[in-house]
Amino acid sequence: MKSFLTKTDFINTFSCPTRLNYILHPEIYTDSTEENEYLQSLSDGGYQVGKLAQLYYKEGIEITDNLIDAISETSNFMKKDEVVLFEAAIQYKNFYIRVDIIRKNKNEIHLIEVKAKSYNASKFAEDIFYNKDGSVNSEWREYFYDLAFQFYVTKCQYPQAKIKCFFNLPNKNVNSKVNNLFNKFSIKNKKAFFLGTEEDLVDNLIAEVDVTSKIEEIIQSSFQYQSQELLFSEIAEELAEAKVNSKSFKPAFGNHCKACQFTDKDKSKSGMYQCWKQITGFSDSKFLDNKIIDIWNYRSTHKLFDKGKYFIDDLEPEDINVENQPVLGDKPLSNKDRQYLQCFGIETYQNTEGYVSNTQFLKQEMDKWSYPLNFIDFETATPAIPAYKGLAPYEEIAFQYSIHTLDKDGTVVHYSEFIHIDSNEFPNFEFIKNLCSDLSKNSGTIFMWSPHERTIINRIANQIIKLGLSKAFKKELNFIEDLLPQGKREMVDLLEISKGGTFYPNSKGSNSIKKVLPAVFRHSKFIQDKYKKPIYGAPNGIKSHNYENVAWIQLDNLGFRDPYDIIKDFSDDAITQGGMAATTFAKLQFEDLSQQERDSLKIALLKYCELDTLAMVMIVESWLNR
C-alpha cells in the first residue's frame, strides 16, 4: 500500500523532521503517541465531544474506516452540491487526511476540526488564540498547524473551491439544561456512541469559531526548517516526499526533544537514543543523566544548543545565567539555586545523607505546624461534557480523596478515604461533605502537594453557589473558606516547601512527588529502617484501608525500588500517576466493563490515592527526623 503523509505525521515532524526516521520504522521504535492519544482523549472527553458535534448534523454521513474505500467514498459524495461528511478522507499525491467534519455547499467547502479544548465564547477569539504580536499562542499552535495542513491538502485536491476553516469547541460559557448528559455516551473500540434522546440535545454546547484568515496567513508564512526559510506548503511537500522515499534526517536538537514520543528504556527501541548517540563524546551515562534538556525549569535550551553544548558537563555558570552560588539559610532555594545544584554539583552543600537540606528554612516552616498533621490528596476529572444540570463544560468532578495523619509521637494512620464512581450520580457534594466532616475531627495542619486540592475545593464552592445550594451547604462553605489562603486552617503546599528546602541528586531537579519519594528512599536512613519491615497494613503496624503487610523499602539490582513500581505488584490495573487515575475514572464511566473489571479498577484507584498521601507522610517524616 502506498505510503502517505498524514496530518499526524505532519504535526509530529513539522518541528522535528528527524521523527520521521522513527515513524517509518514502527516495527523497531517505540512510539507512545497512539496509546497516549487514546487515553488522553478518553480522559478529557475527546470522543464524546466529537460525537456531540456530529449529532448537530442530522444529515451527516459517516465515511468508512477503510483507507482506500474511504477515499473513493468521500470523492463520490463530494460531487454533490450539498453534503455533510464525518471523517471524510482526502488524498492528494503523497498526502492523506481525515477531516472531522466537512460541510459542502456548492463551491464552498468548510473544514471543521473538533477539539475537546475549553473555549469561552464570551471572550474575543484574539484573546484566546493569539499573542499580542498576532502569532498563535503555544497552547493552540499545534491545532492551527493541523487545520492548516488540512486546508492545504483540500485546496490542492479541490483548487476551484472556496475553503473556510472552523474549530468546534466545548463552550465554557454555556450551562447545561440536561441532567447527567456526561453519562449519555459510551465508548467502544475507540468510538463514541450516544445513548440519549433528541430532548437531551437542547444545549448548544459546541461553539463554532471561524479561523480561516489565520489559517490562510499560516499557509502563506515561512518557517525555519532544516537551517533554511521555507513556506508552510514547501515543508509539507518535502516531508511527504521524504516519507514516500524513506529519507532520513540528521538530528536537529532543541526544546522539542523534551517531548519526544520515541523514547524507551531499551536503547534499541529508543529514537531519542539514536539521535543523541550521534553527538561527539556521547556515552550512555551522559544520555541517562546529564542532557541539557533535563535542566529543571530552564526555558532557554535552544541557546545552549546554538553554542554547541549538549550535556550538563559542558556548562559554565554563565551559560545558564547563574551569577551567585546558593546560600543555605532561612530563605527558600530559588530556581537559580536549584539549577546550580543540578548542573554544578552538591558536594559542598550536601548533608551526611547525601542530599541538600536547607535546614533553617525547613525548621522555620515546621515550627508553624500543628499536630496531628493531615495529608490529603484528591483524584479529579474535568470532562468536556457537563456532569450535572446547571454546570458548564470542563467543570471539575472530584471523585476520590485519601487522608493520612501523622501525630507528634510518630504514629501514622491511613485515617480516611472517599471514592464515588457511580456513573449515575454527581459526586462533588457528597465528596465535600465527607471531606469537611473528616478534617473537622482534629485541628491539625492540613497538607497538599501542589495547589490542586485548594483549586478543587474552591471550584466546588463556586458550583454550590452557582446551583443555588449555599443554604444547604453553609457549613461546608465556611469550612472551605477556612482552608483557602488567609483562612484559619490555610492548607500548606508541601511542593513549595520541598522546592525551597531540599535538593536530591538524580532527581534532575524535579519536585514531583513521584521523584521526591524515591529520592527519600535512597537518602533517608530513618525511612529505610522504618519501612523495610512489613508494617504497613499489619495488625500491629500502620493502619491501612487497602494494603496488608507491605514493606515499602525493597531492593532490586538497580537499588531501592520505586514505590510507584512496587504498587504494580498488587494489580495488573495498577495506577502509577495522576493522569492514569483520571483515565481510569473515564473508563468506569464510559466503557462496557464487567463487574470484575470495575472492581479491579476501583481497587487500583484506592491503592494509588492512598500511596500518594502515604508518600507525603514519608517525605515529611524524613525531614522531621533529620
Image: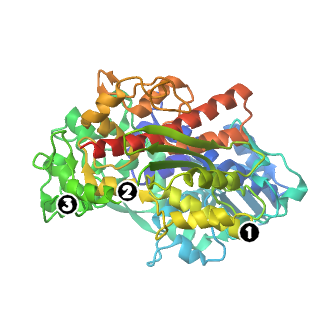
Dot 1 lies on which element? loop
Q: Does the CB distance between marks 3 and 1 fall below 8 Å?
A: no
The answer to whether 51 appears left or right of 259 in the picture is: right
Residue at the disc numbered 1: 471
View extreme (top): residue? 557
Q: Residues within 10 Å of mark 3 (few under 14, many from 20)?
A: some
Residue at the disc numbered 2: 369
Q: Dividing the picture into quarters, in which one does residue 168 lie?
A: bottom right
Dot 2 lies on which element? loop
User: Disc 3 vs disc 2: which is toward the camera?
Assistant: 2
Task: Give the Cα separation between the discs numbered 3 and 1.
Answer: 54 Å
Front position in the image: 86 or 578: 578
Q: Position of residue 20 (x, y in %)?
A: 43, 42
Residue drawn where x is 58% and y is 50% of the image = 438
Residue drawn where x is 21% and y is 41% of the image = 279
Residue at the disc numbered 3: 320
Residue drawn where x is 74% and y is 52% of the image = 182
Q: How does the figure colour the protein chain or chains?
A: rainbow
Front position in the image: 495 or 42: 495
- The three-letter amino acid code for the residue at tag 2 is Trp
